[in-house]
Amino acid sequence: MAMNHSAFVFDYSEFEAELRPVLLEALATDDAAGLVRWIDANRSELVDPYEGDELPENWQTHLPDQRVQTYGDFALTKFYDPTDSIGLDEDWEELEELLKDSGLSDTTILGMPLGPEGGALFDPGACGAYFQTPGAVRDHLVKLEKLLARSPKLQGSLEPVVSMLTAAREVNQGLYVTF
């Protein structure tokens, strides 16, 4: 079964200031109490990451399980719209190979995983979750544009990657990538 690359324009700066420390602590301790408090305090700005619906007052009864990963998945929706994927869908593996063959890293279409040093990575779907800061988006786009200047024949093939990165750069945001 092919994995589907979903990517979302992501407010990494706000995430870093508000949720990242809470999420890292929860991952390090495998204790969701801090995430639950954070979600309760921000519930009006969160949505269901699977359907995009507002979180009701009894939001915990709608969770598929009580894992830190699941709470983190719900909390993260403050920083992106889960109904607006700009990802590469099933084409991501082919594009990843093309980028690698051209000397670019797979972080161009993925980003970096998130987790405490030596601890569990944030990966709510258990298939990979990655983040790109606004700076990483800009850097990847610059490298991609240099590659396309050297190898214009790749323009058509790499257009979906250019479009994904450009969408985030245009609003000075990062990316959240998941499968």
Image: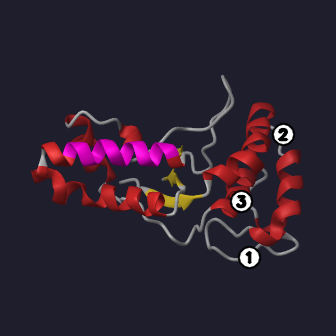
Tag 1: residue type? Glu
Quarter of the image for residue 110 reads: top left
Answer whether residue 143 is magenta in the image: yes
Element type at mark 3? helix
Q: Mark 3 sits on what residue?
A: 74
Q: Residues within 10 Å of mark 1 (few under 14, many from 20)?
A: some
Residue at screen point 58% across, 67% down: 82
Q: Earlier in the sequence, mark 3 or mark 2?
A: 2
Q: Residue 164: image x %, image y %?
A: 39, 59
- Check disc 2: other Cα within 10 Å, few if <14, some if 14-19, many if 20+: some
Tell me the magenta residue range: 135-147
Helix, strand or loop at label 1? It is loop
**Mark 1 vs mark 2: which is more N-terminal?**
2
Question: Between marks 1 and 2, how big is the CA–CA gap?
Answer: 25 Å
Q: Which mark is residue 31?
A: 2
Q: Within the image, what quadrant is residue 114 found in?
A: top right
Q: Mostly what secondary structure, the magenta segment?
A: helix
In the rendered structure, find residue 54 and report the number of the disc placed on it: 1
Query: Which residue does the image show at 55% across and 38% down from the upper left?
Result: 113
Q: Report x, y in % for residue 135.
A: 50, 44
**Mark 3 and mark 2: Cα distance apart in space:** 15 Å
Type of amino acid at the residue the image marks with label 2? Asp
Q: How many neighbours does mark 3 have within 10 angstroms: few (below 14), some (14-19), or many (20 or more)?
A: many
Question: Which element carries disc 2, helix, strand or loop?
Answer: loop
> How is the protein colored in the picture?
secondary structure
Q: Is residue 98 above or below residue 116?
A: below
User: Disc 3 residue type?
Assistant: Phe
Magenta span includes 171: no
Residue 127 visible from this viewpoint: no
